[in-house]
Image (cartoon, rainbow, N blue to C red):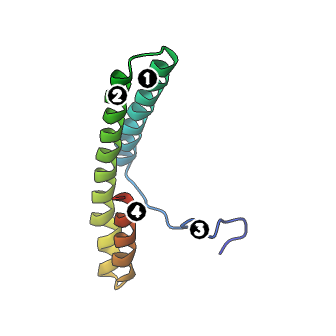
């Protein structure tokens, strides 16, 4: 392990196409904007149900992002690992799914 590397962080990386990165970052920026909107709603003492609806929209947007990312991960990283004989990828995927689905 490299020095100054957190022992709990993965050193693995995923090469993404420019289009994949662009799409993912656009989604995240949209979600970031929604969060800022919620912050403004709280600062402006907006009605609770209005805020709750916006929080629900952000939650749905994050869940949608997770679905796209998970699908990409399964089709690329997991599939490649299994093809190369690394069955540990299945255990890793199961662990990730357990954490994501809490």
Compute the Cα span from label 3 to label 4: 15 Å
Q: Which residue is drawn at 57% across and 65% down?
A: 9
Asked if residue 72 is positioned above or below residue 50 in the image, the reply reads below
Compute the Cα span from label 2 to label 4: 24 Å
Which class describes the residues within 10 Å of circle 3: few (<14), some (14-19), or many (20+)? Answer: few
Residue identified by numbered label 3 = 8
Verify CB contact (< 8 Å) between mark 2 and mark 1. Answer: yes
Secondary element at image label 1: helix
Asked if residue 79 is positioned above or below residue 68 in the image, the reply reads below
Give the mark, 1 or 3, whose residue is nearer the N terminus: 3
Verify CB contact (< 8 Å) between mark 3 and mark 4. Answer: no
Secondary element at image label 3: loop
Compute the Cα span from label 1 to label 3: 33 Å
Residue 22, percent from left and from top: 38, 41
In the image, is 9 to the left or to the right of 19?
right
Residue identified by numbered label 2 = 54
Residue identified by numbered label 1 = 37
Which class describes the residues within 10 Å of circle 4: few (<14), some (14-19), or many (20+)? Answer: few
In the image, is 86 to the left or to the right of 5?
left
Give the mark, 2 or 1, whose residue is nearer the N terminus: 1
Residue 73, percent from left and from top: 33, 62
Q: Which residue lies furthest to the front in this view?
A: 48
Compute the Cα span from label 1 to label 4: 28 Å
Which class describes the residues within 10 Å of circle 2: few (<14), some (14-19), or many (20+)? Answer: some
Residue identified by numbered label 4 = 99
Task: Give the mark toward the camera: 2 or 1.
Answer: 2
Task: Give the mark toward the camera: 3 or 4.
Answer: 4
Residue 34, percent from left and from top: 40, 28
Of 83 and 95, nearer the camera is: 95
Q: Quadrant of the N terminus?
A: bottom right
In the image, is 39 to the left or to the right of 83?
right
Of 84 and 34, nearer the camera is: 34
């Amino acid at each position: 392990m490299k020095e100054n590397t957190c022992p709990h962080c993965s050193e693995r990386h995923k090469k993404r196409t420019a289009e994949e990165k662009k799409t993912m970052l656009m989604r995240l920026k949209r979600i970031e904007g929604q969060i800022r909107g919620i912050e403004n709603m709280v600062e402006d003492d907006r009605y609770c149900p209005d805020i709750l609806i916006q929080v629900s929209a952000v939650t749905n947007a994050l869940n949608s992002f997770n679905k796209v990312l998970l699908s990409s991960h399964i089709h690329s990283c997991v599939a490649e690992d299994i093809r190369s004989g690394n069955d540990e990828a299945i255990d890793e995927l199961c662990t990730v799914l357990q954490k994501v689905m809490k």
